[in-house]
Amino acid sequence: MKHSGPRSINPREGLNWLRQALVLLLRRPGLFIATALFAPIGSTVLLNLFELGSPSSGWFSVVTAATCYGLPLSIVVPLACALARAVNRELVPTTRQLLSVSAGRVLGRTALFVFALLFQAYFTGYLLQDIIRPVIFASSLGTAGGSASFGMFDSVLGAQLGALGVLLLVFQLLFCIFVIPLHLFSERPFYYCWRLSFLAMQLNPWLWPPLGLGGLLLILLPMVPVLKSIAQVLALPLPVYIGSLLYIAWLEIFRGGEEEPVVLDSRAEEGEYSFS
């Protein structure tokens, strides 16, 4: 697939992306609900696995938080982005196609890229907190029991909402938000996709405040007792909505709002699937 270079978009046009992303989700609500449920279910399974024998090390606390909450989230966001494009093109893949080698390869690489960014953010946060408040932080780890305390909240959904906020902040700081759709839909090397994403962010600096403020809000929302119920409501649909929004933004900035015609090949007939 050939990509045109990124273009500058008026912020007023960007506001329309919010509606377009929601329309895509509502066209196939069952598909996106199933995708959204993967995150809390995956986190619950991973938490149970880590609790089988968790040491009291502070580093293990960070690994647990990043893996249990970040890994499922890192899969859901790019998967929702890919499915949003499939829904828009009216070519939704079957379960067999999604589990094919070709689809699993590109989705797995993208998810690992997102998870690596989130994992580094967790470790950076741990180091900063350990340097600023070493005594308090060490004592809090000692009283955490068998579960990890760093980066975790009172519930799985609240923790995932905070992890999503961390991810948005990372995207803002590293200018790499468009790496997800660029790699999914072209399978170009990550360094090439990152360069294009960096250029797109420079051409559209109005994207920086929504990413930064949105990320901070998602991190703080589960921590406020009065707003915990709102956090629980938002935590489930928001990752798939972000994925759909990424697709819409990529389509407008890199494709001028127009999709390429769908070309079916022999690989699709054999059960292979490509997101491009």
Image (spheres, rainbow, N blue to C red):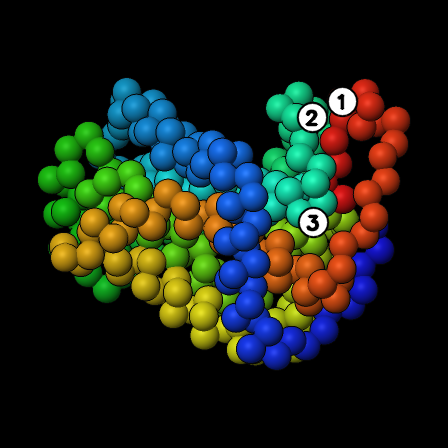
- Relative side of 67 to 184, left or right: left
Q: x%, y% of residue 39?
A: 42, 36
Task: Say the numbered circle drawn on residue 271.
Answer: 1
Tell me which numbered mark, 3 or 1, is placed earlier along the sequence.
3
Q: Nearer the viewer, mark 2 or mark 3?
A: 2
The kind of residue tagged 1 is Gly
The kind of residue tagged 3 is His
Q: x%, y% of residue 38?
A: 44, 32
- Relative side of 246 to 50, left or right: right
Residue at 23 percent across and 40 percent down: it is: 155
- Relative side of 217 to 169, left or right: left
- Relative side of 48 to 138, left or right: right
The quadrant in which residue 57 appears is: top left
Question: Residue placed farthest to the right in the image?
Answer: 266
Tell me which numbered mark, 2 or 3, is placed earlier along the sequence.
2
The residue identified by callout 3 is 183
Tell me, yes or no, whether the two marked residues, 1 and 2, touch with CB atoms within 8 Å. Answer: yes
Residue at 69 percent across and 67 percent down: it is: 253
Q: x%, y% of residue 103?
A: 69, 32
Tell me, yes or no, whether the two marked residues, 2 and 3, touch with CB atoms within 8 Å. Answer: no
The quadrant in which residue 165 appears is: bottom left
Q: x%, y% of residue 205?
A: 56, 78
Query: Label 3 vs label 1: CA separation?
Result: 21 Å
Task: Say the numbered circle drawn on residue 97.
Answer: 2
Query: Label 2 vs label 3: CA separation?
Result: 19 Å
Residue at 40 percent across and 56 percent down: it is: 166
Q: Determine the secondary structure under disc 2.
A: helix
Task: Say the numbered circle drawn on residue 263.
Answer: none
